[in-house]
Image: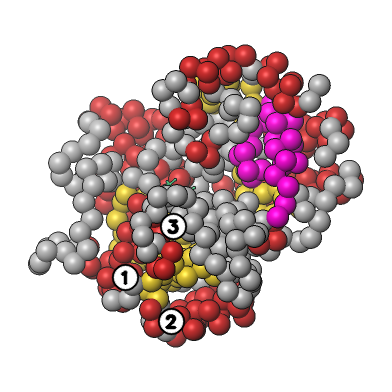
Amino acid sequence: PSEAARYRERTPRSAALMAEAVRHLPGGDTRSTLFYPPYPLFIKHGEGCWLTDVDGHRLLDLSSNHTALVHGNRNPGVLAAVADQLTHGSCFPGPSATQVELAGLIHGRIPSVERLRFTNSGTEATLNAVRAARAFTGRGRFAKMEGGYHGSQDPMMVSTHPDPAAAGPLDCPRAVPSSLGLAPGTLEEVLVLPFNAVAETRALIEAHADGLAAVIVEPVQGSAGMIPAEPAFLAMLREVTAAHGILLIFDEVVCFRLAPGGAQAWYGIRPDLTCLGKMIGGGFPLGVFGGRADVMAQFDPREQVPRVPHPGSLNANPVSLRAGISALEQLDAGACDRINRLGERLRAGLQSLFDAHRLSARVTGAGSLFGIHFTGAPVRSYREVMGADPGRRHTLFLGLLNEGVMLDPRGAGCVSTAMGETEVERFLAATRRVLERIDL
Ligand code: PLP
């Protein structure tokens, strides 16, 4: 039987729930990225690095909710912190000591984040960072990378996954809408840059510098399939933006986990602004944007109406803050080091398996993050994989689900601190079984 037939056979309860779900929710869910054909597994329970679906199958969780659960499911420290907070209440019409504590922890670990603000999501974090940059510089446009994903607000839904036919040449990528319904003028406000192409990106920034408020970049592109920036690329961005008064924004929503001080410590580059999300809330809704004190001072309401208001009924939600404090405290240097080493082992093991099966597939990533791409050439950017056949990746993904392993549907994943060598070897053994069973 095909992997899809096997999958249907194993998952009747998910199928039934999906049939019910689509009567109320378009596509059966509220996160577009969670859908995969024929229908996604409905998850009932998570424990450490294991998930249980509604049909009772246990799955090794290499998604960790798309990297958000860096300590796995139901982490005891996070649960205790949340339970304690709930004895006091869930949210208040005043600031909390908890907020000061997490802000201090983040500032202590990321020196470039001199002042920060909390949001409910990574989307809101990048939205406010770009707005702050526009207000500060008085310029209207900003630049993002082709294949870069920073959330679902209009200007970020540009060239996230462009088709090869629409993408334009490397030295001048076209701004391609990733959604219908974007506000008129959205494409004009965005300059799209070719990731990891040092000379081309430098030339584009220099040509458009006068109108650019900011350049936003993921040091490791997550949604494009865990593709790390080359150090020289980030160094060039830092130099050219500084030379032209453009703010450099690091989106570390996914890749903060590389080091206790985040991706900027890992690369040794100090951005002007930083955005955090996903793991920073320990599995609860939380985002952060922050950076230079002079830029962030625009949000200060003490002496005047703030130049940039930043309201939000559930901003800095105390439950999320407490979860975030616990998650951050547990992600110390030893923990980062351990999951990074496990990630290295996983990527090397996976690449050897693909090579042994003579598959033209490449494993990318950094630290505890990994991505799988079905292409024969080295992968340095989304551009190299934009023509790759998504069918093979999907077949591998379904095969792994049938073997009790959950990745992200786009073929990416990560190691959590709830894992050890045994789980990494288990994943590799499951992959080997899939590769022996199906012809990719
Ligand atoms: N930035 C990056 C790098 C992301 O991967 C994501 C989400 O996947 C976001 C921002 C948006 O975060 P959220 O989903 O919390 O809005």
Drawn side of residue 281 relative to residue 236, left or right: left
Question: Residue 383 colored magenta?
Answer: no
Residue located farthest toward the left when viewing the structure as drawn: 303
Report the residue at 81% width, 56% height from top: 376
Evaluate if marks 1 and 2 touch, with contact meaning CB atoms under 8 Å apart: no
Q: Residues within 10 Å of mark 2 (few under 14, many from 20)?
A: many
Residue 360 percent across, percent down from the top left: 83, 51
Tag 1 residue: 134
Give the quadrant of the N terminus: top right
Choose the circle earlier in sequence order: 1 or 2.
1
In the rendered structure, which disc, 1 or 3, sits on the residue that comes first in sequence? Answer: 1
N-terminal label among 3 and 2: 3
Residue at coordinates 29% horizontally, 33% vertically from top-left? 85
Q: Which residues are magenta?
A: 387-412
- Residue 335 seen in render: yes
Q: Which mark is residue 247?
A: none
Q: CA distance from mark 1 to mark 2?
A: 13 Å
- In the image, 284 versus 422, the foreground residue is 284
Identify which amino acid the numbered label 2 is placed on: Ala
Q: Which mark is residue 209?
A: 2
Circle 2 SS class: helix
Quarter of the image where one finds residue 309: bottom left
Dots 1, 3 in contact, CB < 8 A: no
- The residue beneath circle 3 is 156
Label 3 beta carbon less than 8 Å to ligand 1: yes
Query: In the image shown, does 253 or 39 lie closer to the viewer?
Result: 39
Answer few, some or many: residues within 10 Å of disc 3's Cα (few below 14, many 20 plus, some between 14 and 19): many
